[in-house]
Structures are given as structure tokens and as C-alpha cells.
Image (spheres, grey):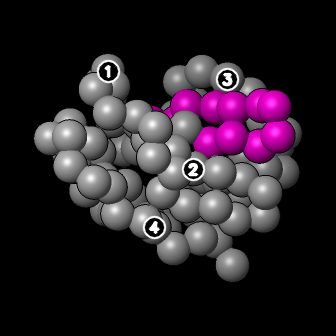
Amino acid sequence: MPTISIFLGISIRMYFDEHVPAHFHAYYGEESIAIEIETLRILKGNIPPRVLGLVLEWASLHKKELLEDWALAEAHKPLRDIRPLI
């Protein structure tokens, strides 16, 4: 599961061979969440509200890059790093 971005203690990862819809995982400490890329809908998990806001802000800024990484993951190709939220 490659890490594609890290910022403010948040790690953003994507798995190879994942189920649709296209999504990513955000980890913060022991907590994690899966978020659909197109709609930014929470698929499962829970993280603190402030952290969720940061993740959603980052994802909205990088939606195109997230979808590109999703396509790479489906093709079992190396994923590209995405700039952190700074």
C-alpha cells in the first residue's frame, strides 16, 4: 500500500487491486478513513473532525492527481507522490 502524501501527521495511501469506487485511505495515528475521490464521500472509518477537514481540503485540491494515481494502481504501476497540504 503506497503512501502518496504525508502532511500534519496524516498519511494518505492507496492500495493496489482495490474495489470501486475510486478511493484513498487517510491514516491519523491509530485511526483511518476511506474516502471516495469523485464525491469526497466517506466510505468507512473515522478520524477526528479537524483532521477530516484537512484531508477533504487536500483531496479537493488534488482530485485529478488522485484519479491518475487510482488508474496507475489499477494497472499495477508505481504511484506518483502528491504534494502535501501546507
Q: Which residue is mark 1?
A: 19
Whether residues under marks 2 and 4 lie with C-beta atoms below 8 angstroms apart, the answer is yes
Q: CA distance from mark 4 to mark 1?
A: 21 Å
Q: Residues within 10 Å of mark 1 (few under 14, many from 20)?
A: few
Residue 47 visible to an observer of this rendering: yes
Which residue carries the number 4 mark?
82
Secondary structure of the residue carrying tag 1 is: loop
Marks 2 and 1: CB-CB under 8 Å? no
Tag 3 and tag 4, C-beta contact below 8 Å:
no
Q: CA distance from mark 2 to mark 1?
A: 17 Å
Residue type at the position of mark 3 = Gly
Type of amino acid under label 4: Ile
Which span of residues is magenta-colored?
26-36
Q: Determine which of the numbered discs, if any, sits on residue 39 in the image.
A: none
Is residue 20 located in the magenta-colored stretch of the structure?
no
- Which residue has dot 3 on it? 45
Residue that mark 2 sits on: 12
Determine whether the residue tagged by mark 4 lies in a helix, strand or loop.
Answer: loop
Mark 2 closeness class: few <14, some 14–19, many ≥20 residues within 10 Å: many
Question: x, y percentage for residue 28?
Answer: 77, 43
Q: Secondary structure at mark 3?
A: strand
First of labels 3, 4 by sequence position: 3
Q: Nearer the viewer, mark 3 or mark 2?
A: 2
